[in-house]
Image (spheres, coloured by chain):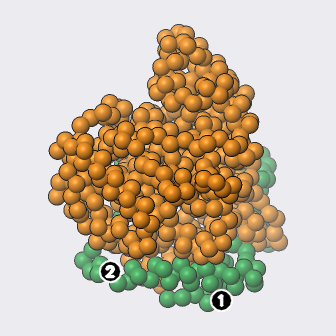
Chain colours: A orange, B green
Amino acid sequence: MTELTRLTIAEARAKLSAKEISAVELTDAYLSAIEAANPAINAYVTVMPDKARDMAKASDARIAAGKAGALEGIPLGIKDLFATHDVHTQACSHILDGFKPKYESTVTQNLWDDGAVMLGKLNMDEFAMGSSNESSYYGPVINPWKAEGSNQDLVPGGSSGGSAAAVAAQLCAGATATDTGGSIRQPAAFTGTVGIKPTYGRCSRWGIVAFASSLDQAGPIARDVRDCAILLKSMASVDIKDTTSVDLPVPDYEAALGGSLKGMKIGIPTEYRVDGMPEEIEKLWAQGMEWLKDAGAEIVNISLPHTKYALPAYYIVAPAEASSNLARYDGVRYGLRVDGKDIVDMYEKTRAAGFGKEVKRRIMIGTYVLSAGYYDAYYLQAQKVRTLIKRDFEIAFANGVDAILTPATPSSAFGIADEDLASDPVKMYLNDIFTVTVNMAGLPGMSVPAGLDHKGLPLGLQLIGKPFEEETLFKTAHVIEQAAGRFSPKKWW
Amino acid sequence: MSVDLATVKRVARLARIAVSEDEAQRMVGELNGILGFVEQLGEVDVSSVEPMTSVTPMAMRKRQDTVTDGNKAADVVANAPATTENFFMVPKVVE
């Protein structure tokens, strides 16, 4: 049975369509793997064995009838941020206690329409606010990777830590995730998995619990580049229910794999050489350039002068939008209610009990920067800086650069309950230093595993592309993957 | 700019989050840490720069102002902590 969970989506798809395996067998193999591993890894906050088996049975019937969809019978894990009809949807927050929506998010509906099977809902940082998956109401996710010769529990990254850990530990064939400042790419890098945040507007945000609406974007985390391409094709769509969904046809991303890099220009931004960057990350980056050069691409140095302002601008824009989006949790329409002496007292007590520390901190920052007298100094200034960050990329692309190569994270996975990081929120925020610019500019970004560090932990490289040119990222990431190989953790659970 | 204890309490009130004296004290330090970090934005020359208001340059799609959905009162209140006859129940707000 464990053999079945080793199959990539592409491999499982071939075996299912050749009727070598059934969707029910495949789903059962994953359900057994989850049962055995989840007490140790805590990737799932709810598992739906009966629903999954029913969906798999229906898939087998469609395969038998010759009506298989693009993801027929493929078992997936869904981040708890996606609304799933009558199924646990809490953004891993206490304030959404018991919430089971009466509607389905567009992205998950697209997956079910293509025949995918839902195994359950995945752990995440509360409201997607975090870089370590430690802010979840359901406790931290444990990274399936451990440093060589060490038993210490490591974080899987965040906020899509459950998605990344479940994919790495083979507890689902692929997973949905979301990325507001790096929440797909950083956990993918920490777990040796592949993740893509598509261009803003490519996947519908309808039915995804909102954090920062101008930055949030859904995307897949999978075991390899091909699987990511297969998943994104199904997740992406034009959606009338999301006014920021872009009216462009969804290409066949898988068809881009194997394409030549001849004549491509890959930009290397000088500003990403940050102080104190570990030497092995420098080396990995240089190695990535070599691989792309060997494949026929030209490497050019570029400048993105406003890079250092992306993270501070993000920590104004994202909390401001969050404070507004999270105003809806008031103990009236859904989730937790703590009674008070009057309605305002009820709101205040409900929100005090329902939100965790990091979420409160960000609501407070957002409320402050939007409050009378501070709006221009903070929010307006940040939105102007955002224009400049976007302009940096536009200039690079106008000068002929097709894609940009950077490290995905400034380090490999760190320990659970790291005291240094816990004592200083800003230090934790610095995890997103290479990824956040992409959200600020609305561009597509992809993290692909490129090697292991001296502790035997995975490291990723990031590719940044032009708006709606995800195909270029898949093609380029595939070259890196071919050269670097794939990385799986040693099973200890 | 930095915040003091009174400002933290005022912002918590605006955000409708009850905070204890201890929490408010702790937040003064945390918020000032973050505000100190974002202070560097002030050094960027943004004269004649337009603020970003749309991530993708596109006109917002509009639809006809007609009813396209509805008759789902039971669904709408299904997750509420307290309801009666498809109304949300809240503590008394008028004396």
Quarter holding the N terminus of chain A is top right
How far is mark 1 from mark 2, CA to CA? 30 Å
Give the amino acid type for the residue marked by disc 2 in the picture. Answer: Val
* Left or right: residue A348 compared with residue A148: right
A249 left or right, relative to B10: left
Tag 1 subunit: B
Q: Quadrant of residue A248?
A: top left
Residue under the point 72% across and 79% down: B23
How many marks the image carries: the answer is: 2
Q: Please give the chain letter of the residue carrying mark 2.
A: B
Which x, y percent locates residue A46?
71, 42
Label 2: how many residues lie within 10 Å, few (<14), some (14-19) or many (20+)?
some
Q: Nearer the viewer, residue A246 or A401?
A: A401
- Taking A407 as reference, is A231 above or below it? above
| Residue at the image point whose x is 64% and y is 54% from the top | A149
Q: Residue furthest front?
A: A149
Decide if residue A394 is in sight here. Answer: no
Using residue A256 as the reference point, say whether residue A49 is left or right of it. right
Image quadrant occupied by the C terminus of chain A:
top right
Residue B93 versus residue A359: which sits nearer the camera? A359
Q: Which residue is mark 2?
A: B44
Give coordinates of residue A475: x percent, y percent.
31, 39
Residue A491's disc number: none
Instruction: Read off the residue under disc 1.
Output: B6
Q: Is residue A53 visible?
A: yes
**Is A81 placed above or below A133 here?**
above
For image coordinates 61% across by 80% down, the residue present is B30
Residue A290 vs A11, above or below: the answer is below
- Residue A70 image offset from top left, x and y in percent: 46, 25
